[in-house]
Image (tube, rainbow, N blue to C red):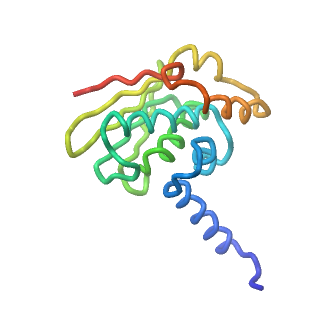
Amino acid sequence: MKPITRRSLAATAAVAALHAHDDDAIPSLDRSTLIHGSAEPFAVAGYLMGEAALAALTLGRASEDIEVVHYSPRQRQFSSIVDGLQAATGASLGQWNLSIVEAKAGPTASVVRNKRTGQSVRLTLLPAFVKEYAGLPAAARAAAASRLTGIPPAHIFTLTRIG
């Protein structure tokens, strides 16, 4: 039996991340947790936003035509949305089709664009969602993230077509 090394652990993590994008049997909570590292309500919200964007733009996960830009303040809860978007859409920093733009204040927003058609959607968390889930203690985040999988997306975010 081979000894466990940093390289073998990194390879195992890479395989897990790959499955997070390619295994359609993994539910949204598990897929966003694999990318984010823990169950987090804002990451699950990002996942649900990504799914909605793909449906609205008629794109499949990991499409070469997708581009995702997330605007948020430099706060963990709001930047966690990016991990959910990545898990849902297959966009990534390494593919240069996922980017984060620091916003000083105001609501976070994500714009997902179909590069082939030029159509875009803007996804914004509802203020009621932010109020309820922002600042949750770490011990409460996993249960809150799990509850989100049964909530209609219209209670979490808005989706607006842009062009």
Q: Give the camera-side residue of 119 and 24.
A: 24
Q: Position of residue 129 (x, y in %)?
A: 58, 19
- Position of 18 relative to 36 (above/below): below
- Position of 83 relative to 102 (above/below): below
Q: Give the camera-side residue of 66 and 55.
A: 55
Q: Position of residue 1 (x, y in %)?
A: 77, 85
Query: Left or right: 51 with respect to 130?
Result: left
Q: Which residue is rendered at x = 51% and y = 47% of the image?
A: 87
Q: Position of residue 112 (x, y in %)?
A: 35, 37
Specify the quadrant of the image occupied by residue 138: top right
> Which quadrant does the C terminus fall into?
top left
Q: Which residue is rendered at x = 57% and y = 14% of the image?
A: 128
- Position of 34 relative to 3 (above/below): above
Query: Left or right: 160 with respect to 48?
Result: left
- Position of 25 relative to 2 (above/below): above
Query: Left or right: 7 with respect to 103?
Result: right
Q: Residue furthest front?
A: 25
Q: Position of residue 144 (x, y in %)?
A: 70, 29
Specify the quadrant of the image occupied by residue 76: top right
Q: Which residue is rendered at x = 36% and y = 33% of the image?
A: 111
Q: Which residue is rendered at x = 66% and y = 33% of the image?
A: 145
The number of discs equals 0
Q: Residue furthest bottom?
A: 1
